[in-house]
Image: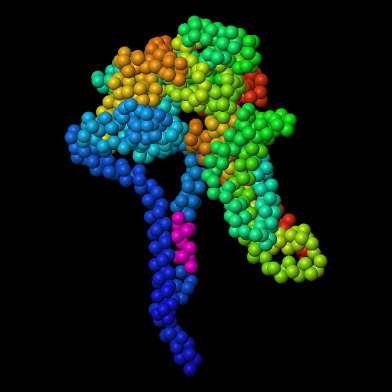
């Protein structure tokens, strides 16, 4: 009897069934395989190839090179311009990302209310994002011209000395951060708004009954509830902020980041080294250093955000 | 059961299809270039003199070749004309907006292939191209010998004596000035008198500048960088040693002396605007500076950006002799499929008659000796510059041009470092000595 019991199901596992089981197990991997294959070819391979080139004195035109070990890294790390570029990148990053995300959160909170012509307001904040970054940079660099720019003329009208937008490093960072904020604030606001819309309304109602004010509700319900989205936005902004390129490149006509490297960013430095000096070994080394920098900084931000927002959460409870 | 299975197979097929589509999508991104080269190869296989041939030519800015693009007031269409003369040739003409885009494209495709059959190269990046002269066709032939002024031919001849480019235009410089501002300063205003006034070396030029500044209190010339390129292009050896190719600029007292001279003068005489910046363009019309070193193509820049100003003039003079700013070559990449036909096209386009027509079209001054006697060139007059006889003036300026210094593979980077030093002084971020020290550090790091 026992043996027939065992036999019966064993017989039932036909080829079709076994295929079916395999299907259940293997198919999901097959479905996601296209992405990983494409990622392997167009994502992973270039990264690895860049690593190889960064160890070589590479001539991209003849597609040949000579292995020189860590010479490129040594050069880049001893290069004055690289460290200035790091300074500028972090400065522009801080001046853009931090105010941008704070403003975006508040805009999202405003848009989360019952407004008239809601769709109009919501679409409007996305408008700057639709404009080409190069066009934004062109328009803003006219506004920020040192002598005859509109901003300086306005400042002159209220008796403030002209700001040297293309000479003073901090002023140039502000100007570039303005362009970045112009473009990305609305975009981030919409993502945060989507998250806020998903917050259960009962939570607000319950807290309102308990006597919580608007501010209290915002900090104790909205912020903790949108935590995963906030982390996502912060991480993507960090990556974007550290890779900033278009705006500093278009900020003046030469695109070299200023005579004293006032607004030379790491990505721009990499581009200039590669395409300006045709030195792809060093450019690859810079690319890898930037990659590592972003990984470290991204993790740091992730950890920070989790800590900050979750402590709020526990307090809220 | 069978239903779910079908669903699964369907999903599987869909997955595979998406995968295939993605790959196809990526592949199609590369297709246009590859497609065009294979097309050319196919045609080259059966090429004889009268078989149909399709050629591509890539240029930038406004070389004055064709009116089919944006320049409606051109008198001649050279591309069209060549196709009429050679019915078996079909030309596709690509024009990049600016030289920087063309340079990037050139170096991206020079190794792997995919360049146009005829590619235009600018004087600024020619030294870099010369490092890869073996990837370009040797264009020297009896037909073109002695066609160009010496420095144009020398600029495209590599160490093995191969001529890799046919010169198109050149930039012999004169001095543009604002007659109204000169009058305010109590200086002569007539072009001939101004030429006499500025005739001499750079000391004289800066002395006139001092007079101007004393009288008006405003800037005499546009920028230190503009004057710098005028000065450095008159040295025999500037940045690099012609024989060894090594960077010698830091041991070259002439360069430092010029640097000191121009930074001292610029303190009062320069508008401190960066060339091609917003303020610099505004200065063309609002009188922020009174003079500028002027190659032929600059006339169009001034006219285009200060259309309402009537007082710009051109003086037939240049400090310390002559100077050349700009110029291009037509090259034929060796990877091209129709090298022979492409060479013919490049040769025809750079022949004296065609260069005279391009000059009439877009003001690109010829680099061919024979074109200087062409009535279309000698008789040219520029209405905007108060009827300046630009044909005569630039012919004389071209004769006065002294050979440019050797420009090797580091020219671009060294020049960039010094230009940055000048800009820092102009912007007031550093004094001349401190700024030079930074340039020294930058130059020492090159290589």
Query: Exactly how many numbered labels are in the figure?
Result: 0
Q: Residue at x 42, y 85 (%)?
A: A11
Task: Please say whether residue B224 is one of the residues in the magenta stretch.
Answer: no
Q: Is residue B393 above or below residue A288?
A: above
Q: Quadrant of the N terminus of chain B?
A: bottom left
Residue nearer the viewer, B259 or B80: B80
Quadrant assignment, res B151: top left
Which residue lies most toward the bottom here? Answer: A1
A307 sits left or right of B345 in the view: right
- The image shows residue B368 at horizontal and vertical percentages of 33, 18
Q: Is residue A212 above or below residue B248?
A: below
- The image shows residue A13 at horizontal and vertical percentages of 43, 82
A86 sits left or right of A16 in the view: right
Evaluate whether residue A284 shows in this view.
yes
Residue nearer the viewer, B255 or A22: B255
Q: Residue at x 40, y 31 (%)?
A: B60
Q: Residue at x 51, y 24 (%)?
A: B308
Q: Which residues are magenta?
A: A28-38
Residue nearer the viewer, B413 or B381: B381
Residue nearer the viewer, A172 or B110: A172
């Amino acid at each position: 009897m026992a043996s027939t019991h065992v036999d019966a199901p064993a017989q039932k596992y036909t080829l079709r069934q076994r295929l079916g089981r395999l299907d259940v197990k293997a198919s999901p991997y097959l479905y996601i395989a296209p992405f990983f294959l494409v990622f392997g070819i167009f994502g992973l391979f270039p990264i690895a190839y860049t690593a190889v080139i960064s160890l070589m004195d590479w001539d991209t035109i003849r597609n040949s090179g000579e292995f020189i070990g860590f010479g490129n890294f040594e050069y880049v790390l001893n290069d004055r311009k690289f460290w200035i570029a790091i300074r500028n990148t972090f400065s522009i990053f801080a001046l853009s990302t931090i105010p941008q995300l704070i403003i975006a959160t508040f805009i999202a909170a405003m848009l989360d209310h019952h407004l008239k012509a809601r769709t109009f307001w919501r679409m409007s904040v996305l408008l700057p994002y639709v404009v080409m970054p190069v066009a934004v940079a062109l328009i803003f660099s006219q506004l920020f011209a040192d002598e005859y720019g509109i901003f300086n003329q306005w400042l002159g009208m209220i008796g403030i000395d002209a700001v040297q937008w293309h000479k003073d490093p901090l002023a140039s960072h502000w100007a570039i951060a303005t362009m970045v904020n112009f473009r990305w604030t609305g975009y981030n606001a919409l993502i945060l708004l989507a998250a806020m819309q998903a917050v259960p309304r009962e939570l607000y109602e319950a807290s309102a009954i308990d006597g919580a004010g608007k501010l209290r509700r915002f900090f104790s319900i909205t912020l903790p509830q949108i935590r995963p989205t906030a982390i996502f936005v912060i991480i993507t902004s960090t990556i974007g902020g550290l890779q900033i390129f278009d705006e500093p490149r278009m900020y003046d006509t030469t695109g070299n980041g200023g005579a004293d490297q006032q607004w030379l960013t790491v990505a721009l430095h990499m581009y200039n080294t590669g395409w300006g000096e045709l030195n792809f070994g060093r450019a690859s080394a810079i690319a890898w250093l930037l990659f590592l920098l972003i990984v470290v900084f991204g993790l740091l931000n992730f950890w920070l955000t989790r800590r900050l927002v979750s402590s709020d959460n526990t307090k809220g409870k | 059961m069978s239903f779910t299975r079908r669903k699964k197979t369907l999903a599987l097929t869909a997955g595979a299809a998406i995968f295939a589509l993605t790959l196809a999508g990526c592949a199609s991104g590369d297709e246009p270039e590859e497609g065009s080269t294979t097309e050319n190869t196919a045609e080259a296989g059966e090429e004889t003199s009268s078989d149909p041939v399709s050629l591509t030519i890539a240029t930038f800015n406004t070389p004055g070749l064709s009116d089919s693009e944006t320049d409606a007031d051109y008198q001649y269409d050279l591309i069209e004309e060549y196709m009429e003369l050679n019915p078996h040739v079909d030309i596709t003409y690509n024009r990049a907006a600016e030289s920087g885009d063309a340079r990037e494209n050139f170096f991206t495709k020079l190794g792997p292939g995919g360049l146009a059959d005829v590619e235009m190269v600018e004087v600024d990046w020619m030294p870099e191209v010369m490092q890869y002269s073996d990837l370009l066709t040797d264009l020297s032939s009896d037909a073109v010998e002695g066609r160009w002024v010496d420095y144009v031919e020398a600029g495209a001849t590599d160490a093995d004596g191969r001529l890799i480019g046919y010169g198109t235009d050149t930039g012999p410089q004169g001095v543009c000035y604002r007659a109204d501002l000169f009058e305010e300063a109590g200086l002569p205003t007539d072009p001939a008198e101004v030429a006499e006034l500025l005739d001499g070396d750079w000391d004289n030029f800066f002395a006139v500048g001092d007079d101007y500044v004393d009288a008006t209190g405003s800037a005499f010339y546009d920028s230190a960088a503009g004057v710098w390129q005028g000065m450095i292009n008159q040295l025999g050896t500037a940045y690099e040693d012609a024989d060894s190719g090594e960077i010698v600029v830091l041991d070259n007292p002439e360069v430092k002396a010029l640097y000191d001279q121009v930074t001292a003068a610029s303190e009062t005489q320069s508008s401190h605007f960066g060339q091609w910046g917003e303020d610099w363009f505004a200065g063309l019309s609002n009188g922020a500076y009174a003079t500028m070193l002027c190659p032929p193509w600059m006339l169009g820049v001034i006219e285009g950006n200060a259309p309402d100003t009537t007082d710009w003039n051109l003086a037939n003079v240049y400090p310390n002799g002559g100077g050349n700013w700009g110029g291009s070559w037509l090259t034929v990449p060796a990877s091209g499929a129709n090298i022979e036909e492409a060479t013919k096209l490049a040769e025809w386009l750079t022949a004296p008659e065609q260069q005279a027509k391009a000059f009439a079209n877009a003001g690109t001054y010829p680099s061919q000796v024979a074109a200087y006697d062409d009535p279309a060139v000698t008789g040219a007059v520029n209405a905007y510059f108060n009827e300046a006889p630009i044909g005569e003036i630039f012919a004389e300026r071209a004769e006065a041009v002294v050979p440019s210094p050797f420009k090797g593979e580091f020219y671009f980077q060294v020049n960039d470092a010094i230009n940055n030093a000048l800009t820092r002084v102009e912007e007031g971020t550093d004094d001349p000595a401190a700024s030079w020290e930074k340039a020294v550090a930058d130059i020492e790091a090159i290589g």
